[in-house]
Image: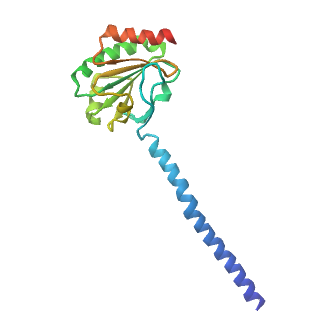
Amino acid sequence: MHFSLALRKISLRFFAGVLAAIFVGLIITPNSSAQAVTKQKSSCSPRVQGEAEVGRLAPTFTAKGLRFGCIESSQYLGKPAVINFWASWCFPCRKEFSLLKTAQKKYRKYGLSIVGISYKDIPSDARSFVKGKQADWSFASDSGGEIAMSYRVRAIPVTFFIDESGKLVSQVFGILSQRELNKEINKLIKSS
């Protein structure tokens, strides 16, 4: 009888342990896994914080890269940056690409970063256009328009100039000339 009672106590403890493990697994593990999956998924989910206003910190964002990976505005802190909203269907934007390419070559030695944000465009069309132009700066897709909304973009092209501290120094609506683009970039470089 002692053996039978001892076996029952062990069985009950074992069964209670199994139930506890299952309970803990159901409660803790899925949440932990869900958080890990969310982090992985959200790392490229469009996120934006802040609103554009000249003289203040520029909105920060994370967006899916047009070609690969994620583009995070924080990776450009500490260097001057140009953010250009464009689309492959936008004729003035197409003309501006060669100007941006020239500026990138000219100012790369100063650490200038250029980020092209595809706005209201079909990603495959935007990728094809970038590839055809052999543009080698960073490109993000803003298919949902969250970043554009934060930067108060109503029409394209529009270009924002951000200094090394992350402050929005100026913005230009419409197509830029090479002279205007160089003038705005020179302001960024002189302030750094």
* Residue 47 in the image, given as x and y percentages of width and height: 43, 38
Q: Residue at x 71, y 79 (%)?
A: 10
* Residue 37 in the image, given as x and y percentages of width and height: 48, 50
Q: Residue at x 50, y 11 (%)?
A: 191
Q: Using the image, determine if residue 122 lies above or below residue 114.
A: below
Instruction: Quadrant for residue 177, please give it.
Output: top left
Q: Using the image, determine if residue 163 lies above or below residue 75.
A: above
Quadrant into which the N terminus falls: bottom right
Specify the farthest residue to the bottom.
Answer: 1
Tag count:
0
What sort of colour scheme is used for the picture? Answer: rainbow
Q: Nearer the viewer, residue 156 or 32?
A: 156
- Residue 179 vs residue 15: left or right? left
* Residue 192 in the image, given as x and y percentages of width and height: 52, 12
Q: Using the image, determine if residue 134 lies above or below residue 189.
A: below
Q: Residue at x 37, y 36 (%)?
A: 146
* Residue 165 in the image, given as x and y percentages of width and height: 52, 20
Specify the farthest residue to the right.
Answer: 2
Q: Nearer the viewer, residue 169 or 114?
A: 169
- Residue 154 vs residue 17: left or right? left
Q: Nearer the viewer, residue 28 or 125?
A: 28
Q: Using the image, determine if residue 4 lies above or below residue 30.
A: below
